[in-house]
Amino acid sequence: MTATIIDGKAFAADVRARVAEKVAALAGHGQPGLAVVLVGEDPASEVYVKSKGKMTVEVGMKSVEHKLPTDTSEADLLKLIDDLNNDDTIHGILVQLPLPGHLNEDLVINSIDPAKDVDGFHISNVGLLGTGQKSMVPCTPLGCLMMLRDHHGSLSGLDAVVIGRSNIVGKPMAQLLLKDSCTVTIAHSRTKNIAEVVKRADIVVAAVGRAEMVTGDWIKPGATVIDVGINRIDAPEKGEGKTRLVGDCHFDSCAEVAGAITPVPGGVGPMTIACLLANTLTAFCRSKGLPEPEGLTA
Ligand code: NDP
């Protein structure tokens, strides 16, 4: 079997186009606004923030960036978040993680108004998702869910294995799959016979951070493989000192067995920013008492 490639880049472009269409249609109610806060000078974070700002503007939303120096005090950061919480032109607030070590991430994230917490990391949103209530849903798992729903239609009754139990990917992913009535297993570094556990799955979501750990012999024939991992490895075939990105799944061997698979790059990655924009639109609609954008929420 050779798997269908789930094209996350095209899917994300479609999500952004749907967001843009809705933003234009709702112009009479105002303009959704997203504020991104970056503390320090982490080059990878700067690239993400720039890309987020560009795409926010492209879908017709207001984009605000706050770049603060590395030595920003917790009090100053909390004051900025409080100002953004009280700013009626801002519907989504994202604090780029990781924060410099002297700042308490939990405290900072939990100071964001949960209604504007478009990353879905606020403890209230975590609790709402865990109890199956309406919440803001973390962007990466939301993107995975959208692709799975698109591919399968209903997920009800399917066996899903999520590899990884982080708060930003693994756990919310498992909650979302459970909400869609999958039978969910979460595997992690202490899981015994992990290959056998994964082999039971109709759906595999790998969010581990270990290059090409999942190989084709772990995959049940016809299963759908969603590869969240982003790992940079040496690529001597491209020349000395060159590198390339790979996922947590060994693409070629998994694609031989799976029914469908997301590539890295070009799979889950592009969906994350698209879902950030979708979440900002959802937050805007909720703040105005408007119906939520169809197909763009969990
Ligand atoms: P974390 O490091 O927070 O969590 C990794 C998880 O993998 C942990 O639960 C850990 O288990 C588990 N794990 C580690 N080693 C093994 C192993 N040998 N077998 C089974 N499980 C293992 O990572 P994140 O969840 O933040 O990210 C995971 C990956 O996804 C990374 O590559 C990251 O770059 C990528 N990512 C991609 C995004 C995107 O937009 N595409 C967004 C976010 C992340 P334990 O808890 O027992 O230690």
Image: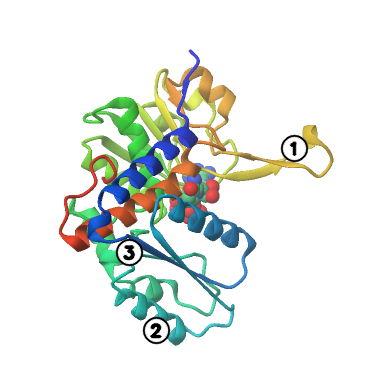
Please state if 243 lies on the left or on the right of 143 as rendered: right
Cα distance, mark 2 to mark 3? 16 Å
Amino acid type at mark 3:
Asp
Mark 3 near mark 1, Cβ–Cβ under 8 Å? Answer: no
Q: Helix or strand or loop: what does disc 1 sit on?
A: loop
Give residue 216's mark. none
Amino acid type at mark 2:
Lys
Mark 1 near mark 2, Cβ–Cβ under 8 Å? Answer: no
Of mark 3 and mark 1, the one earlier in the sequence is: 3
Amino acid type at mark 1:
Ala
Badge 1 is on which residue? Answer: 235
Cα distance, mark 3 to mark 1? 38 Å
Badge 3 is on which residue? Answer: 117
Please state if 179 lies on the left or on the right of 152 as rendered: left
Give residue 79's mark. 2
Please state if 77 lies on the left or on the right of 137 as rendered: right
On screen, residue 224 above or below 19:
above
Residue 244 at x, y percent in the picture:
68, 40
